[in-house]
Image: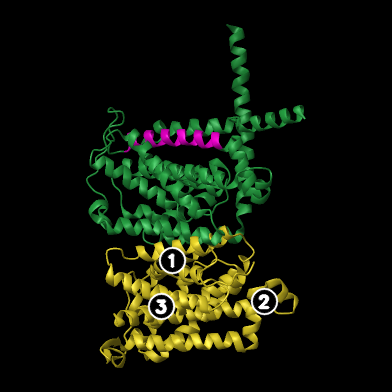
Chain colours: A green, B yellow
Amino acid sequence: MAPLADDVAGYLKRRARWSAVEIAFWVFAFATIWLLPSKHLILTETAILALFALSLDLILGYAGIISLGQAAFFGVAGYFSGLVAKYGIINEPVVALLCSGLVAAALGFVTSFLVLRGSDLTRLMVTLGISLMLGELANRYSNITGGADGLQGVTIAPIFGKFQFDLYGHTGYVYCLTVLFICFVIARRIVYSPFGLSLRAVKGNALRGDAIGIPVKWRLVAMYTVSAGFAGIAGALLTQTTAFCSLDVLSLNRSADLLLVLIIGGTGYLYGGLIGAVIYKFMQDWISTMTPQYWQFWIGLILVVIVLVGRERIGAWNEGVRAALARLVAHLVARPAVLGSAAPDRN
Amino acid sequence: MLTILFDGIAYGMLLFVLACGLSVTLGLMNFINLAHGAFAMAGGYCTVVLVNRLGVPFALGLPIAFVVTAVLGGLLERTLYVHVYAKPHLDQVLFTIGLVFMSVAATDYVMGSSQQFVQIPDALQGQFDVFGIGMGKYRLLIIVICGLLTLALQLILSKTRFGSRLRAAVDDQRVARGLGINVGAVFGITFAVGSGLAGLGGALGAEILGLDPTFPLQYMIYFLIVVTVGGTSSITGPFLASILLGVGDVAGKYYVPTLGAFAIYAIMIAVLIWRPQGLFARSTAR
């Protein structure tokens, strides 16, 4: 038995290793800081959306829970970070960011018990209901949240007391990208850990997962909480980079758009949310310059077409491109490696 | 006090007519149709165009709205929806949300984003005063029409051959199919009628609920509350649920206006936690 267990452990370890494509992806992502300085504002939004999509992927793609209420965590943390900055309770943005994430995670923990009951329809209703309730609350208590006008007068202190947020979004972008990367590494670690593997088993068949001794309910609760925390960090990032927070952060459109982002990129695959966010943002930018008022129509059309064509087929092009990319990068990496190994010999 | 009850019942009746189609489609095909409100909106706009622009009498505008939305629903069901029944719930949600987005933007494009009003004949405006209770004539009309519709639906479901086929299909689709019932056709007809009813409800409710392009998004949650609280196995469940919702909402907005719709959402979540199958559902293992 022991060799078999070693085999399995070795296989899982190899799977969890950072591949060349992944490294290339992140090198390119960080290179955009210098390569595309004029696009930093839209790239900031993309990074935030990517983190938000990542949070949904954790529960939808890895735990199989459909949620229409991910905006609840996004919005609550957004308002929280805006309020603590406005009243000077926590001035350091990084600390405020962590606290917002924790607040959202706490909310996720409490609501997870409601969400994990019942069928898909009940889950949809409860998640939708919770975010609508919070939206209604934010609207009612307009003396705190600013209501329909949004939360105004938020000033964000410089990061670590050094890096001031500037008008062109340069600091904001570097900040968001770094946070996205850190969160991604954490998510990656979670997904490839035994904990993440057990969640996959639960998603595949909850009954059998239970039978082989996985505490299904608590695993789902934990994942839901983590996901809520990530969504919260994304929400706090949005407030911090724009120094503004409006009721829009809690809207249903935000949750629905998020599903679209994830579907474009592919679920159950950490880069899905990231790639989806990039495609979605640039598509939105493109469509809304053509028809500023009616871009929602095209978004709707894309959703309908995606479903009719079939998500699996859309995922298939994804796979093909990924395989081709992997070959390309392997090819590129192999060459410099040969050169690199040759170079020391000459010295 | 009684006026509030009266208004609440009128509102609830309206919600029932709007949502009963949804409850049948959900129960029959286990299909989550978030775009149901779009049909209601279509009916509302249809009446606005007919009555305000073409001068068709209001009494004739309502049946036309019903027929137009029923045909629209039937067409969409045969061309688009049939492909989605077998797909997972996530796909159904994405598909119908996509339809909602499209309908919202298209209506905005064609009709403009401002709120629309149907011109109601003078005879229906004003109030009766019965035993000191002020009853709006128009609301009374709504209660009468919706009450008659509910009775008719109940009779069709319980007395006719089509009704028994439908009930059989809802209870167990596979066995019904085995008995030679054409479930697809039954479903198509039900979907069309359900959409038509939603259209009629939208036309009647334009005055009370307000009609603008975001209608499907605004009322989506109300329809879903009716269906999830009422259960999908009968027609009485959604009916009671919508009356409760209507009275609760009107009373809540009157007595504790600061809470607004918050109370309704809170009650819904509480009910769903207490009885995930719905308040009035029969406890059938499905």
**Apparent side of residue A326 relative to residue A131 in the rendered image (left or right):** right
Q: Earlier in the sequence, mark 1 or mark 3?
A: 3
- The crowd level at tag 1 (other Cα within 10 Å; few <14, some 14-19, many 20+) is some
- The crowd level at tag 3 (other Cα within 10 Å; few <14, some 14-19, many 20+) is many
Q: Amino acid at mark 1?
A: Ile
The label on residue B221 is 1
| Residue closest to the far top | A347
Q: Which residue is mark 3?
A: B12
Q: Which residue is mark 2?
A: B183
Do marks 2 and 1 share a subunit?
yes
Look at the image and tell me whether residue B51 can be seen.
Answer: yes
- Where residue A85 sits in the image (x, y, percent)? 26, 40
Q: Amino acid at mark 2?
A: Val
Of all chains, the one bearing label 3 is B
**Apparent side of residue A128 relative to residue A238 in the rendered image (left or right):** right
- The CA distance from mark 1 to mark 3 is 14 Å
Residue B282 against residue A144 in the figure, above or below: below
Does the magenta run of residues contain A176? yes
Residue A43: quadrant of the picture: top left
Q: Earlier in the sequence, mark 2 or mark 1?
A: 2
- Name the element at disc 3: helix
Which residue: 62% across, 41% down? A198
Which portion, as a residue range, is magenta?
Answer: A169-190
Of all chains, the one bearing label 2 is B
